Image (tube, grey):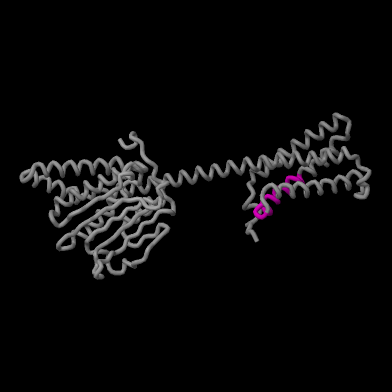
């Protein structure tokens, strides 16, 4: 049975007061009209009308809150109306005519008037209830949107705080200083990459979305800088379908993953390794694969199991931040999987991170949005 915690927990007190005042005013107007037309005394008519109105109001409201979950609003209102009219008629026969058995002696016009009055009260209440419900739903949607916007802002703030760690910046500047003496062209390229990376970290992290081509450029700039520092110990490839480059994505989805691959997979390995990034579309899904030939995940973190519905194998603040932002942008239809991959001979190959989300969440950005 549908669980209700009680009338006070489900009924808005302000609605009750408003509906009661409306019913009272309608009863006054009906009674005045009947009195002016010579159809009866004001107070008698007012009393009978008030019973009809209060009975319909109460019956319809109770029906909406207790029966509508099973039958729908329209049938609930009809049932409440019939119950209210029945209570009003019983009161009319008892108070005015003294006996219910005298129902056939009651003028048909008077019965129709009472029923029409009850229908009017029911209609006014139902219209008010429907308007209130729509307003409440609108407020809930606005509150949900504001809450989601707040979560996005907080996630982006944490993202900004995690961008471009000081030691990376200092190491890069030191490398540039050395390169200026040895290879000025290489120093210029590293400086250009660093400038682009810093600009994106400060400006693009505030955007809700950037183009996939911009994300690819961020990853390329970061890996180029790291390859200068690590030399032959780091190689990389980035592949992206041309028809995906103008599509939107959450900012800094790939760069933190690549950064993890460098620091925890490639750099600790004596011979270094390779990082490959692949961005493709498949079955209306945008798919990103980041594969490295580093040390792989620590023992106990790789369960070699596929995960769906936004579940993650792996750890780290960066991954948690990516997961949260993907949930906010792509709902539960996004996936993030981090696991070890193995060579054909069974040896550990490194770490593989895959991200995917429906392409319907990635509209093509306009030229103004890309600038």
Q: Name the dominant secondary structure of the magenta segment.
A: helix
Quadrant in which the C terminus is drawn: top left
Between 75 and 205, the one nearer to me in the picture: 75
Would you say residue 55 sits in the magenta stretch?
yes
Q: Is residue 41 left or right of residue 222?
A: right
Locate residue 250, reporting x and y percent: 35, 46
Residue occupying the far bottom of the picture:
346
The residue shown at (28%, 42%) is 202
Residue occupying the far top of the picture:
36
Locate residue 77, reporting x and y percent: 71, 47
Q: Is residue 355 left or right of residue 41?
A: left
Would you say residue 300 sits in the magenta stretch?
no
Is residue 350 something that shows in the picture?
yes
Q: Is residue 261 left or right of residue 155?
A: left
Locate residue 24, reporting x and y percent: 75, 38
Residue 189's place in the image compared with 6, above or below, is above
Between 290 and 5, the one nearer to me in the picture: 290
**Residue extent of the magenta highlight:** 54-70
Q: Residue 127, located in which quarter of the rendered image?
A: top right
Locate residue 193, reporting x and y percent: 19, 43
Q: Is residue 185 left or right of residue 81?
A: left
Residue 265's place in the image compared with 74, above or below, is below
Quadrant in which the N terminus is drawn: bottom right
The residue shown at (82%, 46%) is 88
The residue shown at (35%, 62%) is 313
Between 77 and 306, the one nearer to me in the picture: 306
């Amino acid at each position: 049975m549908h669980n209700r915690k009680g009338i006070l927990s489900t009924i808005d007190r302000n609605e009750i007061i408003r509906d009661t005042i409306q019913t009272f005013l309608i009863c006054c107007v009906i009674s005045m009209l009947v009195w002016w037309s010579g159809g009866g005394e004001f107070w008698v008519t007012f009393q009978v009308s008030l019973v009809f109105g209060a009975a319909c109001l109460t019956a319809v409201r109770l029906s909406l809150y207790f029966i509508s979950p099973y039958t729908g609003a329209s049938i609930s209102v009809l049932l409440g109306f019939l119950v209210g009219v029945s209570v009003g008629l019983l009161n009319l026969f008892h108070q005015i005519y003294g006996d219910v058995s005298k129902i056939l002696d009651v003028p048909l016009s008077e019965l129709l008037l009472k029923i029409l009055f009850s229908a009017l009260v029911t209609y006014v209440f139902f219209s008010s209830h429907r308007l209130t419900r729509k307003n409440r739903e609108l407020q809930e949607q606005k509150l949900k949107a504001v809450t989601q916007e707040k979560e996005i802002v907080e996630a982006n703030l944490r993202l900004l705080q995690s961008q471009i760690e000081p030691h990376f910046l200092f190491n890069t500047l030191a490398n540039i200083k050395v390169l200026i003496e040895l290879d000025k062209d290489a120093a210029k390229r590293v400086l250009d990459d660093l400038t682009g990376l810093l600009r994106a970290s400060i400006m693009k992290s505030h955007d809700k979305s950037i183009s996939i081509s911009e994300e690819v450029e961020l990853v390329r700039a970061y890996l180029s800088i790291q390859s200068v520092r690590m030399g032959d110990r780091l190689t990389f490839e980035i592949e992206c379908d041309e028809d995906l480059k103008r599509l939107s994505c959450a900012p800094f989805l790939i760069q933190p993953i690549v950064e993890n691959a460098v620091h925890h997979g490639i750099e600790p390995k004596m011979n270094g390794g390779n990082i490959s990034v692949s961005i493709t579309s498949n079955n209306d899904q945008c798919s990103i694969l980041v594969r490295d030939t580093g040390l792989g995940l620590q023992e106990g973190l790789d369960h070699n199991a596929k995960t769906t519905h936004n579940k993650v194998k792996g750890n780290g603040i960066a991954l948690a931040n990516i997961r949260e932002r993907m949930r906010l942008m792509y709902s539960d239809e996004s996936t993030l999987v981090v696991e070890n991959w193995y060579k054909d001979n069974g040896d550990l190959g490194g770490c593989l991170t895959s991200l995917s989300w429906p392409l319907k969440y990635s509209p093509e950005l306009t030229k103004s949005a890309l600038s």
